[in-house]
Image (cartoon, helix red, strand yellow):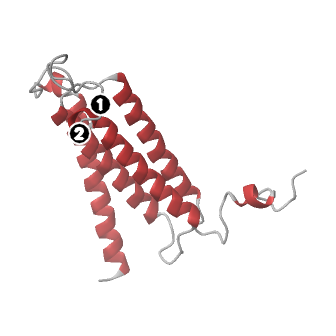
Amino acid sequence: MSKEKATQIRSITAWMLFIAGLLLGGIALLADLLGLDFTPGFGMVQMLQLLLALTSLTLSGFIFLREQRPANAPRSLQADIGVRLAATGLVFCYVSGLSDLIGIGTHVAANEFERPFVGPLQLGGIALGIISILGGMLLYHTSRGFRQSSSMEFLVNGQEETGKKSD
């Protein structure tokens, strides 16, 4: 398979994941307006849809970022940390979103609550996970691409990007 064909397949896959993520996220967030809510409030099915949407958007984002890099450029440590940080953010979102279902949430007592529901701690956990994903994407994007060194090299050796020493 030629490089051009592989690039085209990756691009189509990224767009499909992006559109699927937007559709799943839109359906999950707008289920009440669309008449698709099976339970009152934001239920577990909607939470799973939202988490799958977040996963699709994250994967498509990394595929798009990968396409901007040269094909033969080695991945730097900064890029590896970015990928791992985003993956950790996804895991954190899943654990936060499904915490009541797996028994570590605050609304698991059957006698106090009719069913598990999304509370402020879960929303905060999902928000922190999304921030972690965005931070990982930022680290990946700013890592060495066409350059010989990282764009954050000035942090290590105290030099500005123009090569001058900072005082």
Where residue 11 appears, as percent x and y from the top left, is 33, 63
- Name the secondary structure under disc 2: helix
Q: Quadrant of the N terminus?
A: bottom left
Q: CA distance from mark 1 to mark 2?
A: 8 Å
Spot occupied by residue 61 in the image (x, y as percentages of width and height): 40, 53
Q: Quadrant of residue 45?
A: top left
Q: Farthest residue in the bottom direction? A: 1
Q: Is residue 66 above or below residue 105?
A: below
Image coords of residue 149 (percent x, y)? 67, 68
Tell me which residue sits at (23%, 48%) in the image. 20
Locate residue 104 relative to residue 83 in the image: left or right: left
Q: Is residue 149 above or below residue 112?
A: below
Q: Which mark is residue 102?
A: 2
Q: Amino acid at mark 2?
A: Ile
Label 2, residues with CA under 10 Å away: few <14, some 14-19, many ≥20: few
Residue identifier under label 1: 105
Residue at 42%, 41% in the rendered image? 129
Q: Residue at x 25, y 30 (%)?
A: 29
Tell which of 134 and 104 is nearer to you: 104
Q: Are marks 1 and 2 in contact (CB under 8 Å)?
A: yes
Residue kind at label 1, given as amino acid type: Gly
38 on left or right of 107: left
Mark 1 secondary-structure assignment: loop
The location of residue 165, given as percent across then percent down, is 87, 58
